[in-house]
Image (cartoon, rainbow, N blue to C red):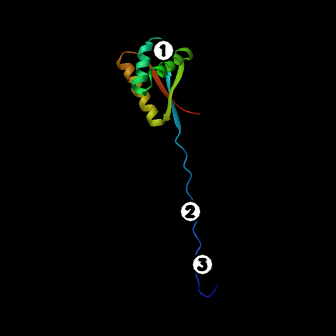
Amino acid sequence: MSNGDTVLKPKTVTKPKLERPRLYKVILVNDDYTPRDFVVLVLKAIFRMPETTSYRVMMTAHKMGTSVVVVCARDIAETKAKEATELAKDAGFPLLFQTEPEE
């Protein structure tokens, strides 16, 4: 093979492995002042939940102190939590939604 022939070797292409973005939980924090009907209304309006699911999430927060509303990307979670908290604040209620990373 030393007669001048060129031997071509294929290049190995490596693709970097991308990690999935970290997910965040939106948490509803129970308080003693916000009416249950208003909490259900906020969950339906901001998080697009059906009536029965909204009621279940609200009751879980009422009984346990907190309840996970939704798990999603960080920017969406923070936006939804802020919108829901501001809606309650505008109505004069201390309802609180928080975000935290999912384990």
Q: Residue furthest bottom?
A: 3
As drawn, the label of residue 31 is 1
Relative horizontal placement of residue 54, taking residue 12 as reference (left or right)? left
Residue at 58 percent of width and 65 percent of height: 12
Instruction: Return the mark for residue 13.
Output: 2
- Tell me where residue 85 sits by quadrant: top left
Amino acid type at mark 2: Val
Between 45 and 27, the one lying in front of the other is 45
Whether the residues at callouts 3 and 2 have beta carbons within 8 Å, the answer is no
Could you say which quadrant of the image residue 40 lies in?
A: top left
Specify the amino acid type for callout 1.
Asp
3 or 1: mark nearer the eye: 3
Q: Residues within 10 Å of mark 3 (few under 14, many from 20)?
A: few
Of circles 2 and 1, which is in front?
A: 2
Residues at marks 3 and 2, CA–CA distance in whole angstroms: 19 Å
Q: CA distance from mark 2 to mark 1?
A: 56 Å
Residue 92 location (% of width, % of height): 37, 15
Q: Categorize mark 2 by other alpha carbons within 10 Å: few (<14), some (14-19), many (20+).
A: few
Instruction: Give the vertical position of 32 relative to 88 (above or below).
Output: above
Left/right of residue 37 with respect to residue 9 in the rendered view: left
Q: Secondary structure at mark 3?
A: loop
Q: Residues within 10 Å of mark 1 (few under 14, many from 20)?
A: some
Q: Horizontal and vertical percent for residue 37?
A: 42, 14
Give the residue at mark 3. Answer: 7
- Residue at the location (39% across, 24% down)? 45
Question: Between disc 3 and disc 1, whose residue precedes?
Answer: 3
Tell me if I can see residue 63 in this picture.
Answer: yes
The residue under the point 55% across, 46% down is: 19
Which image quarter is the C terminus in? top right
Q: What amino acid does circle 3 point to? A: Val
